[in-house]
Amino acid sequence: MNKYHLSADQLDTWEAIRKFAQERIAPQARHIEESNEFPRELFRELGEQGYLGAAQSAEYGGAGCDAVTLCLILEEISKASGAVGNSFNTHVSLVTELIGNHGNAAQKAKYLPDLISAKRMGAFGLTEPSGGSNAGAPLTHAELDGNDYVLSGSKAFITNAPIADIFVITVKTVSGVTAFILERGMKGFEIGPADKKMGMHGSPTSSLYFDEVRVPKENMLGPEGHGFRAFAQALDRGRVNVAALIVGIAQASYEASVVYAKERQQFGKAIAAFQGVQFPIAEMATEIEAARLLTFNAARMFDAGLPIKLESSMAKWFAAEAALRACDTAISVHGGYGYLGDFPVERYYRDVKMYHIAEGTANIQRLVMAREILGRYPI
Ligand SMILES: Cc1cc2nc3c(=O)[nH]c(=O)nc-3n(C[C@H](O)[C@H](O)[C@H](O)COP(=O)(O)OP(=O)(O)OC[C@H]3O[C@@H](n4cnc5c(N)ncnc54)[C@H](O)[C@@H]3O)c2cc1C
């Protein structure tokens, strides 16, 4: 038995992705941050190594891995670079996943091989300028005209949008919220300039604008009116994946803190000798472990076919809170140097804050948890 009760295959994948992430991604993390450039070549490598199709079926070039294995991959990539982890997750866990689960045979054949090889990158458009928390009420709308739907409206904060080729978005149609696949270059579809952000530099976001874009009927993803249900399912699972990404950044901040505390000398000894430094490190290690275990628990429940709405929100909410505390502690342990750009801990702090907001804010996770818990015990 091993610490996390992982199978031999899961341990092998963990070892392989850890090696790849530390050898190929981590050395580029600083450059990605400072240049704010999306690392396209790295994504080609991730495609070649099979990680972009990890969760997809072999028929389209995927590896069909389980949810726990995907968490291991996400944690290691995010630990090496939060920005790569964020773009990877949008591409793999949201866009590829939605097309893999809800696309018809023609859509899967058309899009999955290109997404899995990184020939084309994906973006996921749910949030609108009018609101992200109330994601089931898009103002972007589409009307059927002959064989096309005519789309108008906009989306905001869309990860990968500046570099993506394939966009899966929600739109209001006559029968409810409907999902569509859009392609870069469609007439009337504009992608805004990259947003300036606090963190996640190199994982670009921007707005999308639709001005009477004619989208052929065959680009509808799933039945008309089922779009929000499809996105909500993807987000339930997605929260587990995001929790794994958050654990990755927190783990990086913890490991950096241990190394620094043992090296940095004050009052003639390593600062690790002081209880005021030891105790917060002990607390961050414990909270990260708890977040990882909540994440694995939700992933295992998903693999067992159980509902995970409550457990995935618990994992995402707790991981985000714990990681914010861990990244804050890491800066304190590094003292003044923690506030400078010389050490990566200030990047971890800026990157991890995004996960307190994106894919459901902390409040929205609490709302989901409370609904699930109180719904089980009617008042
Ligand atoms: C870097 C980044 C990348 C992103 N990438 C994507 C992407 O790829 N695709 C995509 O679709 N979206 C993306 N988002 C959008 C993200 O999911 C939203 O920002 C998020 O859901 C919050 O929506 P909002 O910004 O409109 O805030 P609001 O919904 O306006 O919320 C503002 C505040 O009000 C609180 N609040 C709102 N409603 C309630 C309530 N009922 N009860 C209690 N509190 C409430 C929220 O918790 C928050 O604190 C991204 C965001 C960021 C910052």
Image: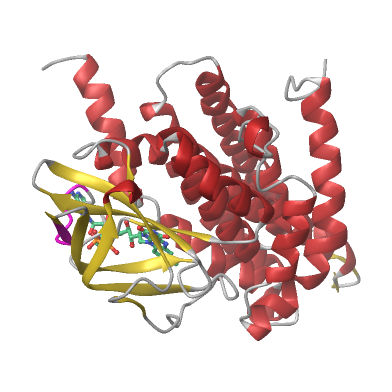
Instruction: Name the image quarter holding the C terminus.
Output: top left
Q: Is residue 32 visible?
A: yes
Q: Residue at x 48, y 77 (%)?
A: 198
Is 74 covered by the magenta stretch? no
- Spot the residue most to the front: 146
Residue 83 versus residue 91 in the image, above or below:
below
Q: Which residues are magenta?
A: 136-143
Q: Residue 24: x percent and y percent?
A: 84, 62
In the foreground, 53 or 88: 53
Q: Residue 254: x percent and y percent?
A: 71, 54
Q: Residue at x 72, y 53 (%)?
A: 47
Residue 216 versus residue 318 in the image, above or below:
below
Is 142 covered by the magenta stretch? yes
Q: Quadrant of residue 38?
A: bottom right
Q: Residue 367: x percent and y percent?
A: 25, 39
In the foreground, 302 or 371: 302
| Left or right, residue 171 beside residue 310 | left
Q: Residue 335: x percent and y percent?
A: 69, 75
| Left or right, residue 268 beside residue 226 | right
Q: Residue at x 57, y 38 (%)?
A: 291
